[in-house]
Amino acid sequence: MAARLALLAVPAAFFAVFFAYPVAAIVARGLRTGEGWQLGRFAEVLAQPDVRQVLWFTTWQALVSTALTLLIALPGAHVFARYDFPGKQLLRAVVTVPFVLPTVVVGSAFMALTGRGGLLHEWWGVRLDTTVWAILLAHVFFNYAVVVRTVGGLWAQLDPRQEEAARMLGASPGAAWRRVTLPALAPAVAAAALMVFLFTFTSFGVVQILGGPAFSTLEVEIYRQTTEVFDLSTAAVLTMIQFVAVGAILALHAWTVRRRESTLRLVDASVTARRPRGARQWALLGAVVATVAVLLVAPLAVLVQRSFGGAGLDYYRALTSEDNGVFLVAPVEAVGNSLQYALAATAIAVVIGGLAAVALTRRDAGRLVRGFDALLMLPLGVSAVTVGFGFLIALDQPPLDLRASWILVPLAQALVGVPFVVRTMLPVLRAVDVRLREAAAVLGASPWRAWREVDLPMVRRALLIAAGFAFAVSLGEFGATVFIARPDNPTLPVAVARLLGRPGELNYGQAMALSTVLMIVCAAALLVLERLRTDRTGEF
Amino acid sequence: MPADSLLSLQAATVRFGGRTVLDSVDLSVAEHEIVCVLGPSGSGKSTLLRAVAGLQPLDSGRVLLGGRDQAAVPAHKRGVGLMFQDHQLFPQRDVAGNVAFGLRMRGVSRREQAGRVAELLDLVGLPDAGGRAVAALSGGEQQRVALARALAPSPRLLMLDEPLGQLDRSLRERLVVELRELFGRLGTTVLAVTHDQGEAFALADRVVVMRDGRIAQSGTPLQVWQRPADAFVARFLGFENVVEATVGEEAAVTPWGKVPVPADAPSGARTLLVRPAGVRLVAADLGLRCTVAARTFRGTHVAVRLQPENAPRLEAACPLRTAPEVGDEVGVEFDATEVVVLD
């Protein structure tokens, strides 16, 4: 146990210095004056009608997005869990691509589909970018995979014989599903719903691009207050509100996950799926494929198509030009920057997250350790904007004067990567039978040797998958990076956002082209991962 | 304690929370001896093995191997082998990789490893299986590979946890004979645990019966079978006719009436065991009057459950031809040579 606590020390120190400290510093900057803490600001800020408006919109759009995602994605989860069909691997990869795409790309893709001059506008004269629908659809697009992977993953491992046993006891097929399968799935559905709620509640890039002046989430408002209004105290209050909300969501999530782990007997996923039979099953499969095509593939296809607008490769060519008036360097250099930053961030996330996962492996771990588990998830929900700005004002004094250092960006990106690493590694590490380690010990292997000989070969794939996820989310990180990436070293998402913020056909086209590049890099990373996929991984 | 004992436990005690799983156990195993610990599930057998292996620390007492206290010796340095109940073969290694594991940990050269692996696979009857994946093995084959893996580093003590537990009956009966022969030939010192008395009796030089973390009886299979130490051991061995009795000169007073006892039996308030073979069926107007409640075909004989008036049921073993039908009225007499006074 002492050794495990020692393993926890490194991730704990990392989070204290690069997460807790910057966030605390910026909150203090906003709420503390010479006369002490200005807690009265809470009441003042909350009394403002537009702040209430933002809170109300943030909450209801997250609720509606979550409900819509569940409605659309649950049939997909069923199809992936129970049916075996040609091209299943490919389809699974396709639905996962959106999840690792940068929010900025998702935003631009929906802009290209539903915005002014977008595909729907050209064909039917419909514009959604001024309505909330563009945001909601983008959220479904983004989170479809969360539901399919979390719920479908468990569904595939539920023993179909449980339903058969219910049938033998006199339950109709519907009743058997309702009484046996649904209760077993409920914790996974709840966990997935909470994750989707968390992601949409804290949505930034998507709303920033599609929301226009009319719609603003808490996260967007924090950004606005910080960078446009320079009202740090309002930003600090909003950050605290988001912090409390996210903490509550994560606590609920941890609780549902624990329930899911403890009570179910699972079987190998490969034995539960079979070919669809009969018109109804084929129709369901067809409907799911059609949904994926319209909702997930179409926006990306339009994005690619727009990037070839003008005269063929014009926009791509423009990316290499240094003389563009937006950046100090050619936009294409953002590709190299992004890759370097993402690689460094991945290395950090794998080390920190890996150590944490090993330390958290014990199921019987105490409250302290379980609490740390939930703590590691916080960066997923706490305002990335706050973290980014916090980095700037907190890490500017020796011995931690990192403002001028390139490592600042990877550090911020790693914060978001760590939860993914922990979530991917933990189920696999926990699944390694303790007695295999004991068998190795009795055969003469020291504890470290036993870990290397028994655990490592089993988690190697999970480690690679975790690294891939961390790489993809680092590549796409926007909220924090937009603050700390230096103008002469923009990352891909930052460059895309900046191009979108400028008027003119050429800038728009370049944004589409750069988004396409980013999408291809992410998708390539993901397709490599999909080949490594194991059934125990992928809680997201 | 015998001077040549390889393993000895002295007042070994393990507690899980408030429950005492091993309660001050004293046990020694001599070099080349095969000792089988027999007990129902939850009696602490597996914990005993884990304590010897160093996987479970003792709350008090000592484990000595070759006369040395093992308290400070971690599992991987004790030089004992343990074959797990469900084998625990390493799934990512092939058969040869599993068998060679212990040799690799000891830094044996590759050539020597290969030779020893081939030798052991031969020994357990799986020559040429070295390249196979462990997932592709049948239960019996996995058991053999697990045995080869445990034997490969030549442990000074080999421990087996329910070695044949998951196999089907005919395979179990064949393997138990093979194992005994193999251990005899290699001179291996073995400490096995099982809940199956047939397995224990067939395998062991000495049987140790455990109950609730304590040793209830220790002796050769014949001794234990013939003279169970107490009512628990007798019932665990499958005997049903166990009652409280007052033993006198030549007979004991029991709920079944007067039962003759062997001449040298201790007298007083005792527990009495009547083997099924000692329950003789006679005409209904003679002896204790019983109704036949059930009969079970046992291959060589028929086990008959008899219900006397106002007394516990009796089990009798009858020849196939003369066994009565359910509902028949019979009389019962007892045979002193099949009666054992316990305690």
Image (cartoon, helix red, strand yellow):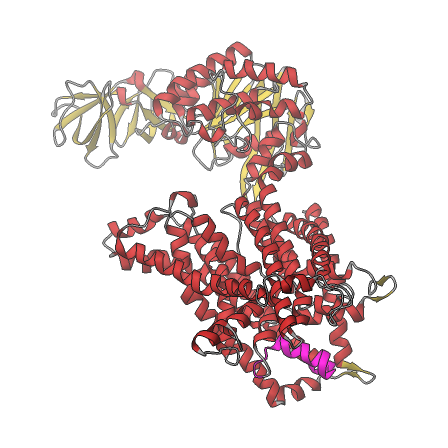
Residue A63: percent from left, percent from top: 49, 74
Q: Is residue B81 left or right of residue A163?
A: right
Residue A214: percent from left, percent from top: 57, 84
Magenta segment range?
A: A214-234
Residue that protrudes farthest toward the right in the picture: A398
Q: Main secondary structure of the magenta part?
A: helix
Q: Is residue B223 left or right of residue A503?
A: left
User: Residue A502 appears in which quarter of the rendering?
Assistant: bottom right
Q: Is residue A368 among what the camera can see?
A: no
The residue at 16%/25% (across/down) is B331
Q: Is residue A220 magenta?
A: yes
The residue at 53%/38% (across/down) is B21
Residue B126: percent from left, percent from top: 47, 17
The residue closer to the viewer here, A175 or B205, is A175
- In the figure, B296 relative to B13: above or below? above
Q: Is residue A384 left or right of residue A249?
A: right
The residue at 45%/23% (across/down) is B141
